[in-house]
Image (tube, helix red, strand yellow):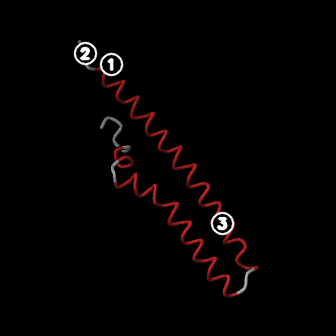
Amino acid sequence: MSCAPCRAACLRRKYRERRRIARDLHDSLGQELSAAKMVADMMPLRSAESKDLAAAEVSTLIDHALKPVCAQHFNGTLRDSTNAAG
């Protein structure tokens, strides 16, 4: 009996999991970056003091957006995606 069907099933599971992760990252990144852009776009209309607060908010939103990407990278999920068989 060959292990080829087992390997193929494993690759399909990995592919589905990677697609799920990519979809989740896309959704969360899209929301966070859209919010950061909205705050940044309104900055010219703000007072000097309010601009500083807005800049801090944009920075916080971007940091929050990057956390899931960094977490996936450092736990090996994204790094493993470069090796389809591994």
- Mark 3: few, some, or many residues within 10 Å (few <14, many ≥20)? some
Label 1 – label 2 distance at C-alpha? 7 Å
Q: Which disc is residue 5 wearing?
A: 1
Q: Foreground residue, 74 or 53? A: 53
- Mark 1: few, some, or many residues within 10 Å (few <14, many ≥20)? few
Amino acid found under the numbered disc labelled 1: Pro
60 horizontally vs 53: left or right: left
x 33%, y 41%: residue: 83
x 44%, y 40%: residue: 18
- Looking at the image, is mark 3 or mark 2 nearer the viewer? 3
Label 3 – label 2 distance at C-alpha? 53 Å
Which element is circle 1 on?
helix
x 62%, y 80%: residue: 53
Amino acid found under the numbered disc labelled 3: Lys
Residue that numbered label 3 is attached to: 37
**Does the CB distance between marks 3 and 2 fall below 8 Å?**
no
- Looking at the image, is mark 3 or mark 1 nearer the viewer? 3
Which element is circle 2 on?
loop
Residue 47 lies, with reference to residue 22, above or below; the image says below
**Does the CB distance between marks 1 and 2 fall below 8 Å?**
yes
x 46%, y 55%: residue: 68
Q: Disc 3 or 1, which lies upstream in sequence?
A: 1
Label 3 – label 1 distance at C-alpha? 47 Å
Amino acid found under the numbered disc labelled 2: Ser
Which element is circle 3 on?
helix
Residue that numbered label 2 is attached to: 2
Q: Position of residue 44 (x, y in %)?
A: 73, 79
Figure quadrant of residue 29? bottom right
Residue 61 lies, with reference to residue 18, above or below; the image says below
Q: Position of residue 39 (x, y in %)?
A: 67, 70
Q: Position of residue 76 (x, y in %)?
A: 33, 49
